[in-house]
Amino acid sequence: MAPPIRFVLVRPGNALNMGAAARALANFGFDDLVAVEPKDENWRLASGSAIYASELIRRAPVMSLEEAIADYSVVLGTASAHNREMRQPRVTLPALEGWLKRKTKKGGKVAVLFGSEQAGLSNDEMDRCS
């Protein structure tokens, strides 16, 4: 059985993108979405692209990054390597399943962080990742 997975949108700037992310998560059966410092304070109202995911958007809490990942044993950060020095080990998508099985062998929960559309995750945020 797969470990519980939380998706964390860090400083999302566009409510429509948040809705599209929620729609993708709902389409694949995921139901744990958190927003950290959303730029649009009306993001729940403006995320009209959340077709079939309005309940997921409605339930998504806003919290700090520390709160969002507090009890997660594995934290994955998504990042482009083209404009930064990667200080954390990288795991490719083809290797992710085996890597996660090893990391969660004794149980645990997984959080996946997505940074803002403009800047992605900061180095400090990436440093919090497994």
Image: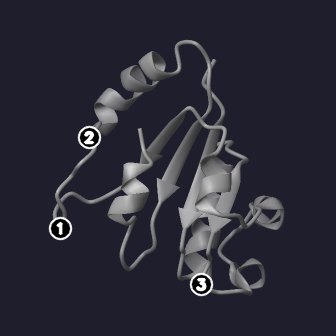
> Residue shown at 30%/31% (left/top)?
94
Residue to which mark 1 is pinned = 83
Identify whether 124 is placed above or below 14: above
Mark 2 lies on residue: 90
Which kind of residue does numbered mark 3 sit on?
Lys
Q: Callout 3: helix, strand or loop?
A: loop
Q: How many angstroms separate mark 2 from mark 1 (CA)?
A: 15 Å
Q: Earlier in the sequence, mark 1 or mark 3?
A: 3
Q: In the rendered structure, find residue 39 and report the number of the disc placed on it.
A: 3
How many numbered marks, from 0 up? 3
Could you give the CA–CA distance between mark 1 and mark 3, rounded to whole angstroms? 23 Å
The Cα atoms of the two marked residues, 2 and 3, are separated by 28 Å
Classify the position of the N terminus by image quarter. top right
Q: Position of residue 43 (x, y in %)?
A: 70, 81
Residue 70 image offset from top left, x and y in percent = 64, 45
Front position in the image: 23 or 80: 80
